Image (cartoon, helix red, strand yellow):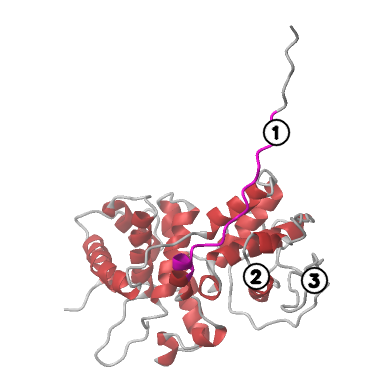
Amino acid sequence: MVSATVTPAPPVRERPRPPPPAVVEAEEQWIFTEDELLQAPSIVDGMSPEEERALRRKGVNFILQVGMMLKLPQTTLSTAAIFFNRYLMRNSLKPRPGYKPLHHYQVAATALFLATKVEENVRKMKEIVVACVRVALKDPNKLVDEQTKDFWKWRDTILYSEDVLLESLSFDMNIEPPYKTMYDMLKYYNVEHNKRLRNAAWAFLSDSCLTQLCLLFTSRAIAAASIYAGARMVDLELPEEDGKPWWEIQCVKLRDIRRACNHMADIYETVPSKDGEPNIYAGLRSPEDGSYFDTPTPGQHPMPEPELDPEPEPANGNGKGKEDANGGDEVMSEEGELDG
């Protein structure tokens, strides 16, 4: 008897479902307009928007440097950056009579400490404190232990500030890092093994951590924008399904993708590329309105040169951007001191 070989049918892809209404509502409270970002507490208290953005970058860069020392995954660092940026939408960094704010490094250290617990990548308190002191003082080999005053200042600051951070965040710990959403989208189109596409999308997300993108768009929109930027760079077209374009299948608005890409292009388009690699932001800009969504080529949508604050180099597919460990900010150990 000859047995017939049965070829298994390919698995049926389950179409992505829109996020639950409760999740959407919870995330929407943390999405702001460009004008609302200019009404952040620090700016209202008299700090210039440029200085406020610079302090945000320095704080997030502090998180990235400490995270690398602790060998934390990028998803945890992304969550910490989101906590940090959200805190600054409800609290000021500028002192005023009767109010002494936390230093941006103190907020960043506390946000990272909280993120390690939320993402279940817990590190010992001693390890976190030692890494924070070394990064703040720009001395990766500094001896820090329970016998040094810096250790106890930073430890007490982080533990005290955790409650302050939780209250400012309204105990909203439900964060979906865009990295996981991006990878799920790649798997849906069976392109997760396309190394150039994956690295380019990852680099977009890593670069976005140093911006305020998480306050302007949902994590799903940011993930979709990263895939678009990567697909444009590797010249890959994602297929339609049932006559619908890929962004509708992924439950993302076309205008949000364009706005997110344009925001990143504004910041990184003019930054020189490294090691001869192409800049994924070159020519990324596209009109926010309109029905077409073609893949632009570099130079297709010229734009005037923006006035830029000093920025780290874009990752361009390497998944990492570099900046000085503390963004040029001199930090003394006394910054870990509390009032009273």
Please report contact status of discs 2 and 3: CB closer than 8 Å, yes or no: no
2 or 3: tag closer to the N-terminus: 2
Question: What residue range appears in magenta?
Answer: 8-24
Q: Residue at x 49, y 68 (%)?
A: 24
Please report contact status of discs 1 and 3: CB closer than 8 Å, yes or no: no
2 or 1: tag closer to the N-terminus: 1
Q: Quadrant of residue 112?
A: bottom left
> On the image, numbered disc 1 is attached to which residue?
9
Q: Amino acid at mark 2?
A: Lys
Would residue 327 be seen by someone viewing this image from the given angle? no
* Closer to the eye: label 2 or 1: 1
The chief SS type of the magenta part is loop
Residue 292: mark in rendering = 3
Q: Nearer the viewer, residue 83 or 292?
A: 292
Disc 1 versus disc 3: distance between alpha carbons? 35 Å
Disc 2 versus disc 1: distance between alpha carbons? 33 Å
Q: Amino acid at mark 3?
A: Tyr
Secondary element under disc 1, as helix, strand or loop, is loop
Q: Nearer the viewer, residue 142 or 269?
A: 269
In magenta stretch: residue 16: yes
Disc 2 versus disc 3: distance between alpha carbons? 13 Å
Residue 317: percent from the left, percent from the top? Answer: 66, 55
**Where is the C terminus found, in terms of image quarters?**
bottom left
Residue 253: mark in rendering = 2
